[in-house]
């Protein structure tokens, strides 16, 4: 079993910000990431409210501005628990013990069934579709994520966006931009729908926190000593914004560093 001062779970904006801040304190965390650094930023067509990016910036470009941690394990964490003041982090690569943990594990999509479409043919993100344009795609969902996905795909596909409602919950700025793109057609109050004729189907109907690997005890009664922090999308509910996630990550790192200092001083 390996031993670490701090383990960060997730390399999206929150996890990368936490790792970067810890480095400023002279702490070199081990970061676990089950996919690729950047998180949901890799799906975002345009981030328009991140400080220092007037006019907006693509999610991919913004992700590249984050510094990568020196130590990153590309494997999925399957279990997290605390025993005898040490956190045990199990992954497909083995078990690691740590004095402190920052959980920035993000979210997973709400999965759906679509009439006439095989389950494994429904996509839940766009990052792997952008380099393989086709003729038409159906986006299911009436929120910000669905319209942002549509914008990302609009240069390579004809996009039909189907929603239960009338898109009234979408940020007005985003809705205005989408309505000006000729390759995107909005279909309000068009669900449920019996069939789809598009070549591809992508669902953007919601996301839930990825916390299934965390022990029930940690989730229900998280330690209040400063050794355990959840940050970013896995804790923020509907407030899933990059700027918020980054702030969460920096705060978690600062509190973690303070905890480690107290531990080292025996207080």
Image: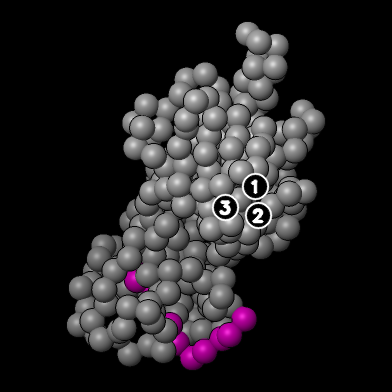
Crowding around mark 1 (Cα neighbors within 10 Å: few <14, some 14 to 19, many 20+) is many
Q: Which mark is residue 94?
A: 3
| Residue 92 falls within the magenta-colored stretch | no
SS for dot 1? strand
Residue 68's mark?
A: none
Colour scheme of the rendered structure: one colour
Residue sitting nearer the eye, 220 or 156: 220
**Residue ID for mark 2:** 73
Q: In terms of secondary structure, what is the magenta stretch mainly? A: loop
Residue 21, how many percent across, how many down? 72, 34
In the image, residue 134 lies in the stretch drawn in magenta: yes
Q: Which residues are magenta?
A: 131-143
Q: Position of residue 147 (x, y in %)?
A: 45, 65
Q: Tag count in the figure?
A: 3
Q: Residue 155, relative to residue 197: is it above or below?
A: above
Which quarter of the figure is the C terminus placed in?
top right
Callout 2–callout 1 Cβ contact below 8 Å: yes
**SS at mark 3 in the image:** strand
Q: Position of residue 165 (x, y in %)?
A: 26, 62
Tag 1 residue: 31
> Considering the numbered disc 2 on the image, is that residue within a helix, a strand or a loop?
strand
Query: CA gap, disc 3 to disc 1?
Result: 14 Å
The image quarter in which residue 64 lies: bottom right
């Amino acid at each position: 079993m390996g031993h670490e001062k701090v383990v960060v779970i997730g390399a999206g904006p929150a996890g990368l910000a936490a790792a970067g801040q810890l480095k400023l304190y002279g702490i070199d965390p081990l970061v676990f990431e089950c996919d690729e650094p950047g998180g949901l930023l890799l799906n975002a067509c345009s981030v328009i409210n991140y400080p220092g990016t007037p006019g907006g910036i693509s999610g991919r470009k913004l992700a590249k501005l984050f510094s990568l941690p020196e130590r990153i394990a590309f494997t999925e964490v399957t279990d997290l628990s605390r025993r005898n003041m040490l956190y045990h982090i199990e992954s497909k690569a083995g078990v690691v013990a740590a004095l402190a943990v920052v959980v920035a594990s993000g979210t997973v999509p709400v999965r759906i069934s679509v009439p006439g479409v095989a389950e494994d043919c429904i996509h839940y993100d766009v990052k792997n579709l952008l380099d393989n344009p086709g003729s038409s795609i159906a986006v299911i969902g009436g929120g910000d994520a669905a319209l942002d996905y549509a914008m990302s795909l609009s240069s390579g596909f004809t996009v039909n966006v189907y929603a239960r409602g009338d898109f009234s919950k979408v940020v007005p700025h985003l809705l205005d931009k989408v309505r000006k793109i000729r390759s995107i057609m909005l279909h309000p109050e068009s669900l449920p729908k019996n069939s789809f004729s598009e070549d591809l189907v992508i669902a953007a109907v919601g996301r839930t926190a990825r916390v299934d690997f965390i022990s029930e005890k940690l989730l229900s009664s998280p330690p209040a000593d400063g050794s355990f922090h959840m940050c970013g999308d896995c804790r923020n509910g509907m407030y899933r914004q990059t700027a918020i996630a980054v702030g969460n990550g920096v705060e978690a790192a600062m509190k973690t560093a303070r905890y480690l200092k107290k531990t080292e001083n025996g207080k």
